[in-house]
Amino acid sequence: MSMTRQAEPAVATPPAPGPGKETDGRTARRPLALRLLARPEVGVFLGAVAVLVFFLVTAPAVRDGSSMANILYQSSTIGIMALPVALLMIGGEFDLSAGVAVVTSALTASMVSYQLTMNVWVGVIVALVVSLAVGLFNGWMLVKTGLPSFLVTLGTFLILQGVNLAVTKLVTGNVATDDISDMDGFDQAKAIFASSFEVGGVNVKITVIWWLVFAALATWVLIRTKYGNWIFAVGGNKHSARAVGVPVTFTKISLFMLVGFGAWFVGMHQLFSFNTVQSGEGVGQELIYIAAAVIGGCLLTGGAGSAIGPVFGAFMFGMVQQGIVYAGWNPDWFKAFLGVMLLGAVLINQWVQRTATRR
């Protein structure tokens, strides 16, 4: 029988219009549209365009340049954190402490600077060390105990939430930190983390630029570096990844520390934007970051996703958050709208992937 199969190509080759017609080539020869649909960020891009068009029609104020700048600003504060959260999810884990970790970072910088009467840059550096240490702790606990990241980071979430409130009250005697706007180094730090610049008469926050820079860097890491391959490998199957020489422990811990870095950066933005920090904030934001990554095409099971998808996911969140206000609707509907958007995005991504993988 094998000899018969070997003879068939010789008979069928002369009348064939091209050498690729009889090959398997299920993915290589698929139409361009299906190959594009296979990309995890395509579905969320189409969704973001649909949401934008919807609010451009229903809320005319969105068409104003300053309104769009405000939408981009809201999107950037979500998107900066959604990027490391997305990388962590591609690596097969997620972090429930990301929201309160942002506040922990801001509180640390503020209290170290004010209570110790030091240059604010000292507080900024100490806050970075604390944020990286929180990520290191999460990653270390995960790899050493084998517990699910849900349990590890839920514990960290509760610890940080309690510490934020208790330490702030103990040190400042209040639930908020003191105003640090008149301290040395404040203006320089504000220029980096919370300044704005003018484009065509519209003020744009610098976080928008940082958001795009971090997105480009994350995309390069995932696509062009060995570390990016490690992220996909440990998210797909950590045991197989370890068998082929991938440093699973290093990759997992470093991904949690990247989330810590993102929490530090967003925390510094909040501190230098408002000069003070409320110790009870941040609860619930971790779900927004995770949802932006999921809407952006990152799977909860790990091993799949991109850095561009969460950018569009964060834009959808910022668009909805501000679009509801500009449309004059009750802002209480915001979370309901996001829930519908999340379920819709997941279903669309599922349909897109099934369509893209068909022959």
Image (cartoon, helix red, strand yellow):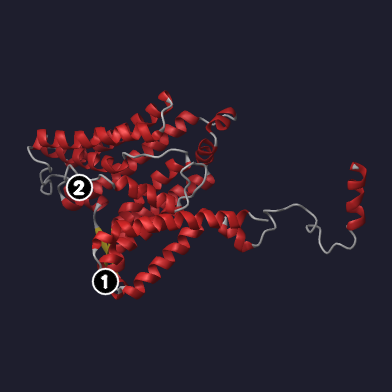
Could you tell me residue 292's position as x and y percent? Answer: 39, 52
**Mark 2 or mark 1, which has the lower sequence index?**
1
> Is 23 drawn above or below residue 128 in the view shown?
below
Amino acid found under the numbered disc labelled 2 = Leu
Q: Is residue 224 left or right of residue 190?
A: right
Q: Residues within 10 Å of mark 1 (few under 14, many from 20)?
A: few
Q: Secondary structure at mark 1?
A: loop
Residue at position x 25%, y 49% from top? 269
Nearer-the-camera pick, 352 or 48: 352
Front disc: 2 or 1:
2
Could you tell me residue 341's position as x and y percent? Answer: 39, 58
Mark linked to residue 271: 2
Q: Is residue 98 left or right of residue 171?
A: right
Mark linked to residue 201: 1
Amino acid found under the numbered disc labelled 1 = Gly
Nearer-the-camera pick, 354 or 272: 354
Q: Residues within 10 Å of mark 2 (few under 14, many from 20)?
A: many
Q: Is residue 101 left or right of residue 42?
A: left
Res 89 → quadrant? top left
Question: What's the distance in space between the residues labelled 2 and 1, CA to CA?
Answer: 26 Å
> Most extreme residue toward the top, as rendered?
144
The N terminus appears in which quarter of the rendering?
Answer: top right
> Is 51 drawn above or below residue 96 in the view shown?
below
Res 68 → quadrant? bottom left
Mark linked to residue 183: none
